[in-house]
Amino acid sequence: VIGERDRDDGAQRIADFLKSHPHSFNAGLRHGVIVFSRWPIVSADSLRLGESPGVPAARVTVDWQGTPVTVLGLHLHWPIGPRASRLRNTELASVASFAAAHEGPLLVVGDFNVTPWSQHFREALEQSKLSDCAAGHGLAPSWPAQFPPLGIRIDHCWMSSHWRSVDVRLGPAHGSDHLPLIADLLKAD
């Protein structure tokens, strides 16, 4: 999932580097999200999170070995100032509500613009009935990419009980101010 893209040709420019992920869905321009997938996308739409008009999230269902898996890719508001923080928190609450009502395999991934130590993060995660893929796998400080020793994790992967997290690590810098978060998951037994 790629968030915060502002150029119309962004999907094509990124796709040129992701030959192993030939399927994609673009959920909007300004601060939108693009989901790239190895597996065929069987349905996709934009879902608005938070207060109207809300930030666009990409709701994508992929066919993973004959099983439909829903991926919600998102980029929440920066918590700069009280208004933006409130918007981000209502977006987190929307994610939690969506996840709690969802049936079937679900992954929620993207730039949450909140650390795992935040009360808002912990409450939303609990209400969502999902698990943090990174729990037990270290800090994974994904932002800012330019100075990792002072980094924090604001990029996250949440998973339904259909999955088991094997590893979460950071990928190499590729020009973004975020380092890629790579989560290795297996189907739960």
Image (cartoon, grey):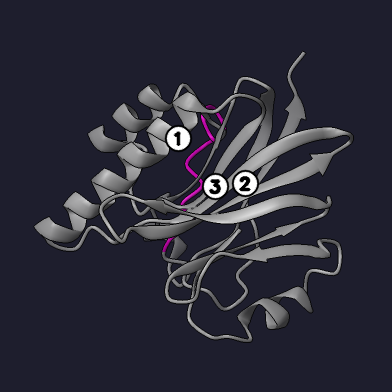
Instruction: Judge whether residue 138 is colored magenta.
Output: yes
Residue beneath disc 2: 169
Q: Badge 2: few (under 14), some or many (20 or more) residues near its Cα, within 10 Å? A: some
Task: Write the start and end of the magenta stretch as one range.
Answer: 134-143
Mark pair 3, 1: CA separation: 13 Å
Residue beneath disc 3: 109
Question: In this rendering, would 23 be left or right of 182?
Answer: right
Q: Which of the image's four quarters has the N terminus? A: bottom right
Residue 46 place in picture, x, y as percent? 52, 57
Give the amino acid at mark 1: Phe
Question: In this rendering, would 185 be left or right of 46?
Answer: right
Q: Earlier in the sequence, mark 2 or mark 1?
A: 1
Residue 160 place in picture, x, y as percent? 59, 26
Q: Earlier in the sequence, mark 2 or mark 3?
A: 3
The residue that appears at 26% across and 45% down in the rendered structure is 90
Q: Which mark is residue 142?
A: none
The residue that appears at 48% across and 26% down in the rendered structure is 101
Q: Badge 3: few (under 14), some or many (20 or more) residues near its Cα, within 10 Å? A: many
Residue 118 place in picture, x, y as percent? 27, 38
Q: Nearer the viewer, mark 2 or mark 1?
A: 1
